[in-house]
Amino acid sequence: MKIDYKIVRSAKRKTIALQIKQNEVIVRAPKGVSHEYIQLLINDKAQWILNKLANQRQVIATPLPTYLPNSTVLIYGIEKKLQIEYQRSKPDEALNLTDHEINLILPLYVQKKSDDHDYLVTQIKKQLAAWMKAKAENYLSYRLDELSKQLKITPASYQVKRYKARWGSCNNKHELSFNYLLVMAPAWVFDYVIVHELCHIKHLNHSANFWALVKKHMPNYKDANQWLKQHQAKMHW
């Protein structure tokens, strides 16, 4: 199968890099590298490139969640149908889970404007976000400590927030951040992100040493990483 690609040359670049972005193959290369050498590289990496393209097409083809009543939402890695109920008084629990459903209770005044889908989705997301943040904080309150002891790596602090394009972060002060949308993933995937960020305290990069440390404490890290890539569209906010 012929693979189309675009070459981007730079006088400052010393190495060749392959990038798969928005269903396009980009080769970033130094100015002196011949087209023939680049073609050999493409041929050598053909299966890897085709796999990446297939994964991206799968993500693009996945319908984005609407967050409307009767739509599905990922919780703990399981797709659950979103059921909405309206009540006048504030309930003790505004969100309850069953094996197959998310039962969300909204105030009566929201029902009066439920024909306005943008408004309704905003209210639904507001409730879901508060619940997810609380669940993520609760999970991290004990799981981060357990994994820190396992790795013998202690963060300076951590926080929970929503990111648009990352699952977690670690800065040079050893402060960690986690995306509360990870509540949509299975616990073992959430654990992978925790281990990933803890390992960044030792290696603030994605070097071979970093990945070796991740693998030591989470041998199935590639599966977790792949799960996030395959489900990122369904975790879209």
Image (spheres, grey):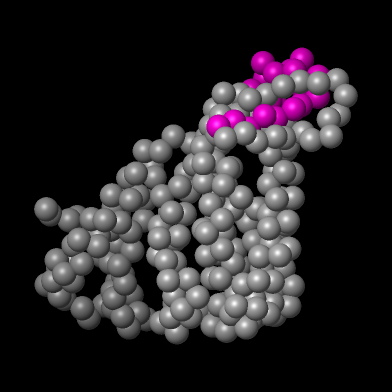
Q: Quadrant of residue 220?
A: bottom left
- Residue at x 43%, y 54% (from the top left corner): 227
In the image, is residue 125 part of the stretch drawn in magenta?
Answer: no
Task: Give the side of residue 56 with respect to residue 65, left or right.
Answer: left
Q: What stretch is highlighted in magenta?
A: 100-120
Residue 91, image x, y percentages: 83, 30
Residue 16, image x, y percentages: 29, 76
Q: Quadrant of residue 35?
A: bottom left
In the image, is residue 103 part of the stretch drawn in magenta?
Answer: yes
| Residue lying at the far right of the rendered structure | 89
Task: Give the side of residue 218 with respect to residue 90, left or right.
Answer: left
**Front residue of 121 and 80:** 80
The quarter of the image holding the C terminus is: top right
Instruction: Answer whether residue 22 is visible to the viewer in this image.
Output: yes
- Residue at x 25%, y 60% (from the top left corner): 49
**Front residue of 119 and 33:** 119
- Residue at x 72%, y 68% (from the top left corner): 158
| Residue lying at the far front of the rendered structure | 99
Instruction: Answer whether residue 207 is visible to the viewer in this image.
Output: no
Task: Give the side of residue 52 with respect to residue 122, left or right.
Answer: left
Please give the count of numbered marks on the rendered protein.
0
- Note whether 49 is above or below 102 in the view shown: below
Residue 47, image x, y percentages: 20, 61
Residue 171, image x, y percentages: 64, 75
- Residue at x 16%, y 69% (from the top left corner): 44
- Note whether 179 is above or below 74 in the view shown: below
